[in-house]
Image (cartoon, grey):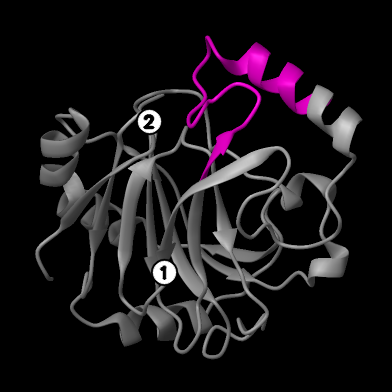
Amino acid sequence: MRDPILHLHGTEQRPLVVIDDFWPDPDVLRDDAASLKMGQIGPHYPGIRAPAPARLAETMRRRVAPLLAQHFGLDPAPAVSEAYYSLVTTRPADLAPIQRLPHFDGVEPGRIAVLLFLGEGQQGGTAFYRQRATGYESVDSARLGSFKAALEEGVGTHGIPAPAYIAGDTPLYEQIALHAGRRNRALIYSGNMLHCAYLPPKVTLSADPLIGRLTLNLFLFDD
């Protein structure tokens, strides 16, 4: 594992940690994903998923725990809430309206996402955004109402975004950061930051874990 790199994003200066060569043998994880039956889990993710083994998720949590204490003020590290192998498979033309917009995983400040890229070739990345109307780069419980109101007003003015994966600035959102997806690169960030997968046309949208944009998504949160 290489030395972690800390980034502070936007006007809110929210931390994001990038770690290359995160896992000792990423091919083992890819083969593990290929052995599982994947399917749609939830209405928001534009693809298919399978739960990752609990022991693997806990090992990952312990691996990132010192960084959560150092950069996020979370000590001890939050518990594993969910962990999935994930493959983006939805064609841009088939995206639901909510999948064409940045999102957040939850409003709780202690919610953490760990995203590990496992695919080969062009993987796109993950982008982070600011809502233009409010200036919000993250959404907590106090901001949720005004965030939703601004989104509804913006959609009323500009319409639902055309079927496509968001890329760069839009009338409603300004992109404030983009981190490229590379094999065995991990991103660690707060789940209440506005973010979305960056998926240019060169990314292969395959249901085969050995070919497609495979990630391991770990969500940490103390209920």
Q: Position of residue 218 (x, y in %)?
A: 40, 52
The foreground one among 73 and 37 is: 73
Give the SS element for disc 2. Answer: loop
Q: Position of residue 110 (x, y in %)?
A: 34, 27
The foreground one among 82 and 173 is: 173
Is residue 144 a member of the stretch shown in magenta?
A: yes
**Which quadrant would residue 205 be assigned to in this image?**
bottom right
User: Could you tell which of marks 1 and 2 lies nearer the N-terminus?
Assistant: 2
Q: Residue at x 22, y 57 (%)?
A: 59
Q: Residue at x 64, y 40 (%)?
A: 173
In-image side of 19 versus 121 (left or right): left
Q: Position of residue 19 (x, y in %)?
A: 22, 63
Instruction: Report the disc number at residue 11.
Output: 2
Q: Is residue 182 visible?
A: yes
- C-alpha distance separating marks 1 and 2: 21 Å
Residue that numbered label 1 is attached to: 180
In-image side of 223 versus 85 (left or right): left
Give the SS element for disc 1. Answer: strand
In-image side of 22 versus 129 (left or right): left
Which residue range is magenta in the image?
129-152
Q: Residues within 10 Å of mark 1 (few under 14, many from 20)?
A: some
In-image side of 208 versus 91 (left or right): left
Is residue 84 a member of the stretch shown in magenta?
A: no
Q: Amino acid at mark 1?
A: Ala
The quarter of the picture where the N terminus appears is: bottom left
Q: Amino acid at mark 2?
A: Thr
Q: Residue at x 52, y 84 (%)?
A: 34
Q: Position of residue 145 (x, y in %)?
A: 66, 12
Q: Do tag 1 and tag 2 residues touch (Cβ < 8 Å)?
A: no
The quarter of the picture where the C terminus appears is: top left
